[in-house]
Amino acid sequence: MEQRFNKSLVTSFGPSQMLPDLKFAEMTPGWDCGGGTYKITREEVEKFAKLMGDTNPGEVNVPVGMIYIFGLRICWDRKVFIDGAVRAGDKIVFYKPAKIGDTITTRLSIADKKEVKKEKDGKVRINKFLYVDMNATNQNNEKIVDIQMSFLLPPTMQ
Amino acid sequence: MSALDFNSVNIGDVLPSKTLAVTQELINAYADLSGDYNSIHVDVEGMKNNPMFGGSTIAHGTINVEPLLQAICAIQGTLWPLEGTKIDLQFRAPVKPGYVISSELTVKEKKTEGGKKILVCDMKIKNNDGSPCVLGTVDLVLP
């Protein structure tokens, strides 16, 4: 499909080393995955509201579903979505509402990891899980939303 | 919009839900808004030959959460979830174009914490056939 994403809305920043460069043992809590900014424009808000059937976003309000829009492209740019990893879940905490005109800064870091032993048909498998914090703040450094994403890493992950 | 009255809610109550019809057009437009063009979402032709999801694309997992987010705001009578509202969710099954998904919140506990009135709810986002695509819990703050 033709890609119409407005790249001018997003910047990204962070260390040159990215998550896929790390081995599982090197994935330690607090490791900085980088981040980026997302500029909330009226045009994007109206498109999102229409798409999701939100009939009244109002003059300044941002539809809540846009919490993911703040970070998805940045996650791809910062390679937080590792090839073969499966999104297992999210933990979300809401703070102040985002508003049209805000510039949202999203910071990504490793929150935790764990290995879970699973037995099936007499075979033992170790599932590796990685937890990544996505913390979004506005231009006044006020918290907007925290999302902790969990991933089941591919079995090939060393 | 008016909020649900905390005092009128009972344990076991099922709260008002929201529904979303997922189409390939919606998924494509979401990709344009989010910049997430993973082929499992947008490559309709390529996925026909991929057995992973039965020859279909699947919606972004974040689309699957949309009915829940809208339902929370409607219950709270707000346009953005009240501060302190928490969701803990697990993605359980993919959602394909053509599915109609809906949220379900069932009250399992009422509590007051730090001056906030909170409904602790079991949460499910269901596919057409009632099977869950997302499961979890919500701490739903009421004004």
Image (tube, coloured by chain):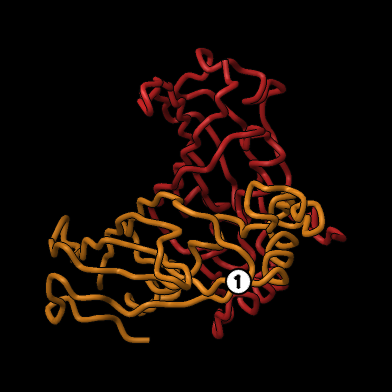
Chain colours: A red, B orange
Q: Position of residue A46 (x, y in %)?
A: 66, 76
For the N terminus of chain A, the image quarter is bottom right
For the C terminus of chain A, the image quarter is top right
Residue at 65% across, 24% down: A20
Residue B23 is drawn in which quadrant? bottom right
Which residue is the site of mark 1?
Answer: B22
Residue B17 is drawn in which quadrant? bottom left
Residue A75 versus residue A67 in the image, above or below: above
Residue at 67% across, 19% down: A21
Camera-side residue of A139 and A97? A97
Say which element carries label 1.
Answer: loop
Q: Position of residue A8 (x, y in %)?
A: 80, 54
How many other residues sit within 10 Å of disc 1, few (<14), some (14-19) or many (≥20)? many
Q: Position of residue A99 (x, y in %)?
A: 56, 66
Q: Which residue is the extreme one toward the front?
A: A121
Residue at 67% across, 30% down: A14
The total number of labels drawn is: 1
A98 displayed left or right of B3 = right
Q: Position of residue A59 (x, y in %)?
A: 58, 80
B114 displayed left or right of A4 = left
Residue at 72% across, 48% down: B50
Camera-side residue of A70 and A122? A122
A79 displayed left or right of A26 = right
Residue A153 versus residue B78 in the image, above or below: above
* Pointer 1 chain: B
Dot 1 amino acid type: Val
Residue A152 versus residue B130 in the image, above or below: above
